[in-house]
């Protein structure tokens, strides 16, 4: 059995600090150590506690990056990127291009849902997606996270890791299901990959041949030739899932997918509903459930059959 993702992240950060670099953010050494993803190290070890002034943290991280400290900047609730990201997006991401001064920085933006209100919850990688000078990943397994981290350490770019607490216990690789000529294809991003996998297994067990493609490199976006072939050969279309709002990054990625296909297919989006989340189960705005994914696939297939 492989290590859980939280253990992989913890080990990488320990090594990062022991190599003389730093990690920084709010409430890092509090109970839980950010979902168990941080080693029990303190300021003298390079684990820097920032004040609760949300808009200032990104500036401290940019300054540390310019000083050569390769900071890992931790945003405990991804929605707080509305406050934390402006100086990163408008300075760190542009510094190399405009002033020829790289600003290598890894942002860990951690999503979660469930009764935590309209700002803190869910994924918000769309906030960073439209800006130049940033690479965006959504790793949900230890293997993906190690690959991303190693690429960060060998580059001088700004990296944004759109994480999700729902993946921290995962100790398995997440693989595609690829049929050469499927009835339908589901493409999943972020934590939707877990529900998508279960939904696709259920649909296949009922005789509907559904492929699953997992996307974790969001920008620059990548598909290999086998994935492109499967998408192009889908009989009834494609459903693209995300844990962000439907008309954010996922819409842009959908357009890129369509442009890569020699045989364009009907492509539908499914993400967060267009509403603000509240602080109770009755007012949550959650990523698509297994049943919702299954129902949407069946509905889209039915529509295409009737055309």
Image (cartoon, rainbow, N blue to C red):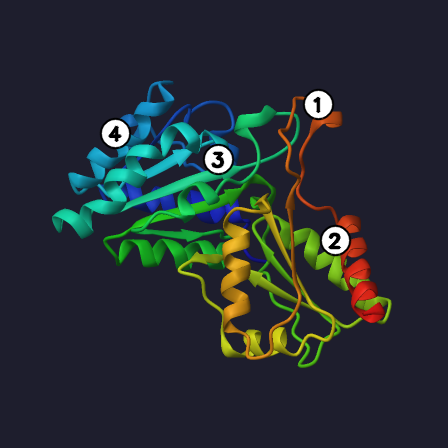
| Front-most of residues 262 and 91 | 262
Q: Is residue 146 above or below residue 54?
A: below
Q: Earlier in the sequence, mark 1 or mark 2?
A: 1
Q: Earlier in the sequence, mark 3 or mark 1?
A: 3
Question: For the residue carrying disc 3, how many other residues have a C-alpha within 10 Å: few (<14), some (14-19), or many (20+)?
Answer: many
- Relative placement, left or right, of 200 versus 44 is right
**Residue tagged 4:** 60
Question: For the residue carrying disc 2, how many other residues have a C-alpha within 10 Å: few (<14), some (14-19), or many (20+)?
Answer: many
Q: Secondary structure at mark 2?
A: helix
Q: Please state, as top left, top right, bottom left or bottom right, where the N terminus lies in the image.
A: bottom right
Q: Earlier in the sequence, mark 1 or mark 4?
A: 4
**Residue tagged 1:** 280
Instruction: Indicate the quadrant where residue 284 lies.
Output: top right
Give how far apart the Cα atoms at labels 1 and 2 are: 23 Å
**Relative image position of residue 239 (x, y in whole percent):** 67, 60
Give how far apart the Cα atoms at labels 3 and 1 are: 19 Å
Q: Which mark is residue 78?
A: 3
Residue located at (81% from left, 61% from top): 298
Give how far apart the Cα atoms at labels 1 and 4 are: 34 Å
**Relative image position of residue 286 (x, y in whole percent):** 67, 38
Residue located at (58% from left, 62% from top): 214
Q: Earlier in the sequence, mark 3 or mark 4?
A: 4
| Front-most of residues 196 and 94 | 94
Label 3 with label 2: CB-CB less than 8 Å: no
Label 3 with label 1: CB-CB less than 8 Å: no
Q: Is residue 100 above or below residue 59?
A: below
- Relative placement, left or right, of 199 versus 33 is right
**Residue tagged 2:** 293
| Front-most of residues 83 and 71 | 83
Q: Secondary structure at mark 4?
A: helix
Q: Earlier in the sequence, mark 2 or mark 4?
A: 4
């Amino acid at each position: 059995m492989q290590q859980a993702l939280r253990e992989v992240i913890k080990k990488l950060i320990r090594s990062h600090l022991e190599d003389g670099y730093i990690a920084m953010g709010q409430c890092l050494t509090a109970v839980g150590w950010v979902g168990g993803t941080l080693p029990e190290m303190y300021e003298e070890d390079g684990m820097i506690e920032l004040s609760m002034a949300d808009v200032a943290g990104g500036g401290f991280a940019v300054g540390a990056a310019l000083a050569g400290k390769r900071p890992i900047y931790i945003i405990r609730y991804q929605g707080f990127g509305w406050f934390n990201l402006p100086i990163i997006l408008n300075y760190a991401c542009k510094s190399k291009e405009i002033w020829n001064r790289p600003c290598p920085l890894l942002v860990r933006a951690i999503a979660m849902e469930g009764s935590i209100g309209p700002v803190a919850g869910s994924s918000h990688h769309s906030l960073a997606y439209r800006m130049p000078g940033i690479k965006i990943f959504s790793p949900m397994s230890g293997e993906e996270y190690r690959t991303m981290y190693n690429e960060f350490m060998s580059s001088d770019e700004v990296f944004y890791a759109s994480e999700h607490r729902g993946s921290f216990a995962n100790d398995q690789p997440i693989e595609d299901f690829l049929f050469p000529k499927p009835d339908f294809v589901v493409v999943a991003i972020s934590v939707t990959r877990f529900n998508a996998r279960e939904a696709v297994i259920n649909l296949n067990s009922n005789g509907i041949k559904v492929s699953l493609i997992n996307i974790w490199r969001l920008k620059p976006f990548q598909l290999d030739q086998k994935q492109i072939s499967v998408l192009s050969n889908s009989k009834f279309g494609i459903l693209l899932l995300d844990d962000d709002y439907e008309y954010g990054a996922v819409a842009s990625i959908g357009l890129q997918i369509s442009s890569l296909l020699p045989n364009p297919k009907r492509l539908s989006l499914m993400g967060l509903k267009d509403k603000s989340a509240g602080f109770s189960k009755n007012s949550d705005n959650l990523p698509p459930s297994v049943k919702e994914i299954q129902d949407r696939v069946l509905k889209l297939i039915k529509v295409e059959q009737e055309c």
